[in-house]
Each structure stands twice: as C-alpha cells, then as structure tokens.
Image (spheres, coloured by chain):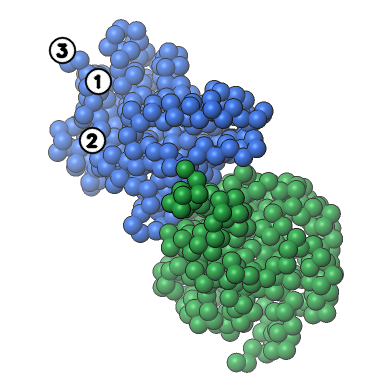
C-alpha cells in the first residue's frame, strides 16, 4: 500500500503545473489527476505525459472516478468565481480542498503562522489567501507575536509576466483578501494591501514591503529576532525568501523589505509570488497528509 | 498652427495631484475654498482625493488630513457648475471606493494603470461605465516608457472596457512636444471618433504648457493642469498659464483667465509648504523619466541616509520603477548607504 495521499489539481495553468512539479517530489503527496476545461490546454497535455489522469470536462469529469482513485486532497488553481462550486463537489466525494484562488470561503492558511490550527480544526476547505499574503503575513505575525500591531500594510510588487489573467481580472479580490489575511492571520487590528505590477525587462524578482505600526514603542531587539526566526521558517519551503533591508524602526513604524525568488520549477525564478503560493499550498497538503496517514484525520464525506 | 475656435475641457489637479507636495495635508476647509473659487472661475472639472487616488491612505504614500469621503462630500455639495472627479489606481483602491465616491457625488471616475497594464482596469472601468451618467476615463501613466503603437493597444483596451475618454499621462514630465504629438495623433486616428482623448502633463522639463498645446493640436480635447502648478515633481501644467495661452490662440476653455490667475496667486501659492518649482531634483525626474511623486520621498531618504537625492532618483529611473513603488525608495537608499559605508 502506498504511503502517499493521492491528490488532484484543478486548473492546468501556470500555477497548477508548477504545483504538479513540486508535488511530484513530495514524500507525502501523489498527484493523480489534472482537471481542466480546454481539451487543447498545454497544461493538460503535460500532466498526461507525466502519467496523470486528465479531463477537460472540469471537476465533473473527475468526480465519478475520485473515490475509486482514492483522491483525498484537491488543489483549486482556477479562479475565485468557480471555486465554491468546485469545492462543494469534491468535498461531497470526501476530499479536502486546498484553495489557491482568492475565493476565501474556508479559513485562511499561512503555513508558518497557522497551518497547525487549520489542520487541527479539520477544515474541509482551507484558503491560501493570496501570493502577496503568503509572502508578507508571516512577517506581520512575526511583529504581532511580540507586541500589539494596530496597523499592518503590505506592498507586493510583481513582474508583469508573473501576473496572470486571473490576478488581473480579480485585482480587487487580491487587495481585499490580502488585507483581511493581514488582520485574521497576521494579527494586525487593521490591514491594508497594495499590489504593483512592473513590466521591466528582465523581469524583477518579487519584492514585498511590510509596514507595521505598533501600539507602543517597538521592542527592537525582540522584533528583529522574531522576524529572523520567521524568515527561517518560510525558507524551509521557499529557500529564496530573503530579507533585503530592515527591520527599519522609525517611531512606531517597523518596515521590512523582502525579495522572494522562486525555485524555478515550471515558473521562472523571478515569479516568487507564484512559487510561494504553490509551495505553501503543497506544504499545507503535506500536513493534512500526515494527519490522514497517522489516522488522526479522515476527510468526511460531506 | 490654427486652433482658433477649438473647444477643450480643462481639468484642475490642485486638490489631488497637489496633495503630493502638500504631503496629503490639505484640509477640508482649504479644499472647499479652492473648489468654490474654481467653480466661480468656470473651471469645468476638478479632481479631489488623496494624491494616490481613492484608498491611497497608507504608510507607503502618506496618511491624509481627512478621508476621501470627507473631502468629496464637503466639496461636491458646494459645487454649482463645476463637476468633481476622483482617481482610482487598481491595486490601491477598489470598486468599493469607487462606489463610495459615486455616493459622495462625483461625476467622473478616472481609472489609472501603468501604461503597459491596462487590463488590470477592466473590473473598475466595466463597473463605472455601467453606472448611469458616470463619465468613465482610462488613464495610462508613465506613457513615455513605451512607443506610440504599443500605447494605442493599451488605450484601446480601456476603450473596449467602456471608457468614454482615455488619457495619455506624462507622469514623469519626460516628454517633449514631438513625443506628445506622436502619441496623441496616433491615438486619435485609432480610437473611435466618439472617444475623448486627454493629456496630463508634468512641468519637470518646463514643457507642461507646450506639451498640452501639442496635445490639443494633435487631437486631444481634455487637458489636465493645476493652478500655480500645485502637483507632484515640478508640478502639473500650470493651468492659469495654459488658459492664458489658450486665450491668445483662440482655444476655448470657458474659464475666466483673470480669475484663474487670481486663484493661482491668491489661494494656491500661499498654500504651498515650499515653492513648487523646477529644482535640481524635479529636473532630474524629467531628465531621467521618474514618477513625479517620488520627489519628496527621495529627498527624505537622502537626508536620512546622507545620500544625494539626485543619485537615488537616477537609480530609480535606471531600474524602470513605475508609479506606486514609493516603497522602493527607502529600500534602495539603504542599499546605497550600505555600499557607501554610511550604515552597516
């Protein structure tokens, strides 16, 4: 009997394909299905070449086979608009849904901050916030675990080439969902998110700035230590997560300047924004897989 | 060049772009006073919001003296003939802000993106153009960074989402009149005849008025400026000067020239914290093609880390930074200070 949990990826685009490449190296996850909607999708063809079962009939094309194929975890890398329906369908077949869209119908999950809680709650749907959220919320949390943060603000700058049509059509969902994640997971009373798309060539590596306003004067030493520890945690799954400058302390402002270089699996290295999303999604799935394998959690047929 | 009898719409930026040199600290009372004077002078359209548009309030860009909602509510209810616009940068503000501004009484929304990224405006322009009577404008910033042919592709995207007017925006004050003419004339040929075309200039190379006239000659019918040039960098096209030139040329703006001069001299100039002028750093913006609102951020970081603000601005230009990347400035200054050994 296999000691890996079988998984399906919905959405054979850039994110889905990068996730597939990462999942193939996983010791805990075995990707078995790739689901798309376009029979001519190059992503479906690539997945088929890698030995996955594929369908171009959307989630409905996979549903009849999910139980016999033992799919217990699904990743949704499509769009916020179709996510709820996808999630309902796979949950009914007893699979946990890991949501990489900004739909945010399930609890937020930022692995180094609250993955253990999300898994302990045995949620059947967890949301990975946004790429900018994955890159920045750990640092807001690193400050707020030291002392009260009244306001957390992030600026995510991504290269034009790494901002796909989904992000572009849903840019408001990015800013809203990220801001909410800064509050719910990051622990700031008020969150604000800004995204900038830069078309420079060669493409710039994802940059993120995190500004926190603390309630009392910041404990510089404790905050600096907490930030370095958090960065080390994120580096476990995104090795290119790098502190460029800071923390800068200016009155009650704490500013942190980051760069996120991806692993360069399917997506180029500059697209750290996409890499951190797929890496965080996979890390979440692996933690669920551990729980399932150890018998602590059995995804329920809803 | 005979432009006699040509009718154009001027759009004043004092209460939006002018927020940059004022560090977003213009008070509600000052806004109402200025707006009423604009109404009295016959200025058809004025913009009111945080300098970085709706939702711009932030550590990154600065916290304003009052909220967008307070500014817009106070100004809109006092206007007799002048209409009020708001700016929205997707990625900073959302459709929720747009709805709030409409509820406050704006009649024009301007949705701004970097010149190559028009498709991030689809969500906002589509919603705005579906609102009855809302003048919906697409605004392409840093338009000097791409060739006219590429720019027109992006303008047409905004037109296709439902914008009834599109703008070519010289955010860096880098363009020369021939650059403006090439972009505007190609856009005029390629866009639908009913789509209005605008130009927004900055005065960093002292080309604000000349560029705006070149835009009108090439087919633009909306021109942005600000009285006394109150705006980012060396300011916007000084609107009272542009109006006087239009008068001389027979271009019809509908604005009382002397009243425009009086607003500039008696209301706006005394409001300035420092004279908005082409100082060395503002000139560097125009020379190196850098987003005008970076000016004060570069000056502050230069002072804090003992660097040359010109060096910072030139490097920001070399890295092809775009509007909104104010957070790059302290980051870059720290890198430069470390290289020079002034910090560890």
Q: Residue A28 carries which label?
A: 1
> Distance of mark 1 from mark 2, alpha carbons?
14 Å
Give the residue pinned by disc 2.
A21
Q: Tell me, yes or no, whether dots 1 and 2 are on the same chain.
A: yes
Among the two numbered marks 3 and 1 on one chain, the one whose residue lies closer to the N terminus: 3
In percent of the image, x 34 and y 33: which residue is there?
A238
**Left or right of B335, for residue A290:** left
Give the secondary structure at mark 2: helix
Extreme residue in the front direction: B341
- Chain identifier, blue in the render: A
Which percent across, then down, holds residue A261?
34, 42
Among the two numbered marks 1 and 2 on one chain, the one whose residue lies closer to the N terminus: 2
Q: Nearer the viewer, mark 3 or mark 1?
A: 1
Give the secondary structure at mark 3: loop
Q: Colour of chain B?
A: green
Q: Would residue A38 be visible to someone looking at this image? A: no
The residue carrying pointer 2 sits among few (fewer than 14), some (14 to 19) or many (20 or more) residues within 10 Å by Cα, namely some
Give the residue pinned by disc 3.
A1
Q: Would residue A226 be visible to someone looking at this image? A: yes
Q: How many numbered marks appear?
A: 3
Extreme residue in the top direction: A295
**Left or right of A18, for residue B163:** right
In percent of the image, x 73 and y 67: which residue is there?
B275
Which percent across, then down, holds residue B87?
63, 57
Chain ID at mark 2 = A
Identify the image quadrant of the N terminus of chain B: bottom right
């Amino acid at each position: 009997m296999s000691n890996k949990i079988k998984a399906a990826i919905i959405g054979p685009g850039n994110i889905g394909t990068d996730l597939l490449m990462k999942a193939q190296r996983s010791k805990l996850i075995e990707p078995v299905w790739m689901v798309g909607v376009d029979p001519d999708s190059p992503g479906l063809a690539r997945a088929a070449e890698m030995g996955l079962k594929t369908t171009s009939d959307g989630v409905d094309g996979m549903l009849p086979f999910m139980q016999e194929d033992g799919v217990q975890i699904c990743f949704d890398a499509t769009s916020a608009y179709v996510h709820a329906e996808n999630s309902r369908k796979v949950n009914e077949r007893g699979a946990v849904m890991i949501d990489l869209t900004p739909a945010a119908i399930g609890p937020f999950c930022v692995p180094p901050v609250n993955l253990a809680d999300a898994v302990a709650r045995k949620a059947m749907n967890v949301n990975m916030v946004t790429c900018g959220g994955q890159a920045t919320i750990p640092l807001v949390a690193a400050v707020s675990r030291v002392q009260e943060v009244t306001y957390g603000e992030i600026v995510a700058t991504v290269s034009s080439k790494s901002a796909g049509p989904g992000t572009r059509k849903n840019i408001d969902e990015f800013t809203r969902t990220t801001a909410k994640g800064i509050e719910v997971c990051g622990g700031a009373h008020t969150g604000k998110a800004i995204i900038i798309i830069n078309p420079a060539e060669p493409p710039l590596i994802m940059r993120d700035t995190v500004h926190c306003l603390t309630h009392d004067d910041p404990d510089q030493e404790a905050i600096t230590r907490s930030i370095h520890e958090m960065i080390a945690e994120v580096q476990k799954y995104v090795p290119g997560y790098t502190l460029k400058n800071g923390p800068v302390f200016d009155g009650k402002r704490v500013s942190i300047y980051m760069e996120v270089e991806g692993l360069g699996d399917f997506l180029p290295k500059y697209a750290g924004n996409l890499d951190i999303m797929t890496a965080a999604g996979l890390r979440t799935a692996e933690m669920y897989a551990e729980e399932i394998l150890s018998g602590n959690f059995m995804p329920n047929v809803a | 060049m005979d432009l006699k009898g040509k009718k154009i719409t001027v759009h004043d930026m004092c209460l939006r772009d002018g927020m940059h040199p004022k560090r977003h600290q213009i008070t509600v009372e000052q806004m109402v006073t200025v707006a009423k004077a604009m109404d009295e002078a016959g200025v058809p359209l004025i913009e009111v919001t945080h300098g970085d548009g709706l939702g711009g309030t932030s550590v990154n860009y600065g916290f304003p003296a009052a909220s967008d909602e307070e500014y817009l509510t106070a100004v809109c209810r006092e206007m007799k003939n002048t209409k009020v616009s708001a700016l929205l940068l997707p990625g900073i503000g959302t459709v929720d802000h747009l709805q709030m501004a409409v509820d406050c009484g704006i009649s024009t929304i301007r949705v701004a993106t970097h010149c190559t990224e028009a498709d991030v405006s689809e969500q906002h322009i589509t919603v705005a153009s579906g609102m009855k009577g809302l003048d919906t404008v697409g605004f392409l910033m840093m338009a000097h960074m791409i060739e006219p042919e590429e720019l027109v592709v992006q303008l047409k995207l905004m037109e296709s989402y439902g914008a009834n007017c599109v703008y070519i925006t010289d955010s860096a004050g880098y363009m020369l009149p021939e650059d403006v003419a090439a972009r505007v004339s190609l856009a005029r040929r390629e866009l639908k005849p009913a789509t209005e075309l605008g130009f927004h200039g900055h005065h960093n190379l002292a080309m604000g008025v000349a560029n705006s006239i070149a835009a009108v000659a090439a087919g633009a019918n909306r021109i942005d400026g600000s009285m006394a040039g109150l705006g980012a960098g060396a300011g916007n096209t000084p609107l009272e000067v542009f109006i006087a030139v239009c008068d001389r040329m027979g271009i019809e703006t509908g604005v009382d020239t002397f009243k425009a001069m009086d607003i500039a001299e008696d209301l706006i100039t005394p409001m300035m914290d420092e004279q908005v002028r082409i100082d060395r750093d503002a000139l560097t913006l125009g020379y190196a093609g850098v987003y005008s609102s970076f000016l004060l951020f570069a000056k502050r970081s230069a002072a804090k880390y003992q660097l040359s603000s010109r060096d910072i601005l030139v490097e920001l230009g070399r890295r092809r930074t775009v509007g909104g990347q104010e957070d790059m400035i302290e980051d870059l200054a720290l890198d430069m200070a470390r290289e020079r050994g002034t910090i560890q």
